[in-house]
Amino acid sequence: MAWYFILLIVLGCIALLAVLYLIVAIVVASGTLKAATKPVAHTLDEARAFQTEYENMDYYDYDNVWRKQSFEVDGVQGKLRGEVIFNDSAATGPAKVAVICHGHTWNRINSLKYARIFYTKGYNVVIYDHAYFGMSDGKFTSLGFYERKDLSSVLDYTRSIFGKDAFLVLHGESMGAVIVLCELSLRNDIDAVIADCAFSNTFKYYRQLCYRITHLPGFPIIDISNIIAKHKYGYDFAAVNPIDDVKNSDVPICFIHGANDRFIRPSHSEDMYRVANNPLSELHLIQNAGHARSYHADRQAYEKILEDFLEKTEHLIH
């Protein structure tokens, strides 16, 4: 075979590989930022129906007992909508408030299982829909890049209701955990954080996920995805690295992660725990739990972890 035919074949293979990488990169970027398929819980009603059927959720207190107030605040992509759950049985003195951030594809309904834990501990609770999910405005999600600014707006509103002396705790699951950790770079009025299955570094997470799903190396696919995300959405993967925010914070953090999580590996939480500065910080790996399933794998253990961490931080900080 003539050398130029060999060259054409080689160049053709390179071109096909480049096209394949580009297609995968576009799919990765689109699937992450736009939820390529319809989100599991696109509406509040769908989330409620799903959790009632598959997770045995009980909404009696939410429907009949808790005093709620709807709110909306300005976010990066428009209005953010949520609810304040007032705890009328809470003790007098400075209020205790938990702001809960849901994960990717979900909405505020997914936060109610955690709201119940906080409520029984005397906390007022704030739940809301991140941009693009639930009832909030937005055309895409950015896994923390813009959402941390949105959360700051929600926290401003929260402080306006409960005061600057309120004991403020953030709880996040998956994407929500990334958001609450990134929030540490924006504010100094957060008293404690509970981060359930967060990733530590965007590029590390995407490259691991890319290889798991496609069996192709993360480089250069994720780098191409980042170029697409920056060009189309103004979202830079390099700007969302919770581990850096943990390093630069002295807020006590409770890291929780499913030991069997294959979507975001437990090593992400382990790495962040190692660089956490506050001696009150904790790490809990929940056995037999997959991604965002720690609560479901062992509800009693999960509730005990939160209760002990809250009592410790409340006692030593106030």
Image (cartoon, rainbow, N blue to C red):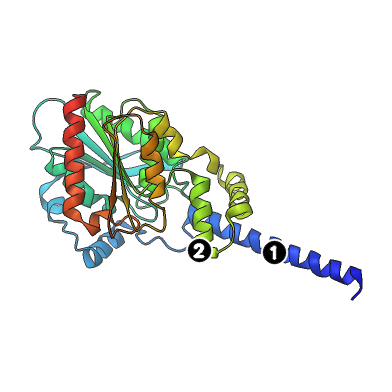
Residue 18, image x and y in percent? 70, 60
Query: Residue 104 got which mark?
Result: none
Q: Which of 82 and 170 is in front in this view?
A: 170
Q: Which amino acid does label 1 sit on?
A: Leu
Query: Residue 17 got which mark?
Result: 1
Q: Name the residue under label 2.
A: 213
Residue at point 22% right, 29% down? 167
Residue at point 54% right, 40% down? 238
Question: Going by the picture, which residue comes out furthest to the bottom?
Answer: 1
Q: Quadrant of residue 216?
A: bottom right
Picture layout, residue 152 above or below residue 20: above
Q: Nearer the viewer, residue 182 or 64?
A: 182
Instruction: Let me know if residue 68 appears in the view.
Output: no
Q: Which of 247 and 141 is in front in this view?
A: 247
Left/right placement of residue 22 relative to residue 101 reads: right
Residue 1, image x and y in percent? 89, 76
Picture layout, residue 226 above or below residue 22: above
User: Tag 2's secondary structure?
Assistant: helix
Residue 312, image x and y in percent? 18, 33
Q: Residues within 10 Å of mark 1 (few under 14, many from 20)?
A: few
Between disc 1 and disc 2, whose residue precedes? 1
Residue at point 65% right, 59% down? 22
Instruction: Let me know if residue 171 appears in the view.
Output: yes
Residue 104, image x and y in percent? 39, 53
Residue at point 33% right, 52% down? 107
Pointer 1 and pointer 2: residues touching (CB < 8 Å)? no
Quadrant position of the C terminus in the picture: top left
Q: Which amino acid does label 2 sit on?
A: Ile
Query: Could you tell me how far apart the alpha carbons at marks 1 and 2 are, in whole angstroms?
Result: 17 Å
Q: How many marks?
A: 2
User: Tag 1's secondary structure?
Assistant: helix
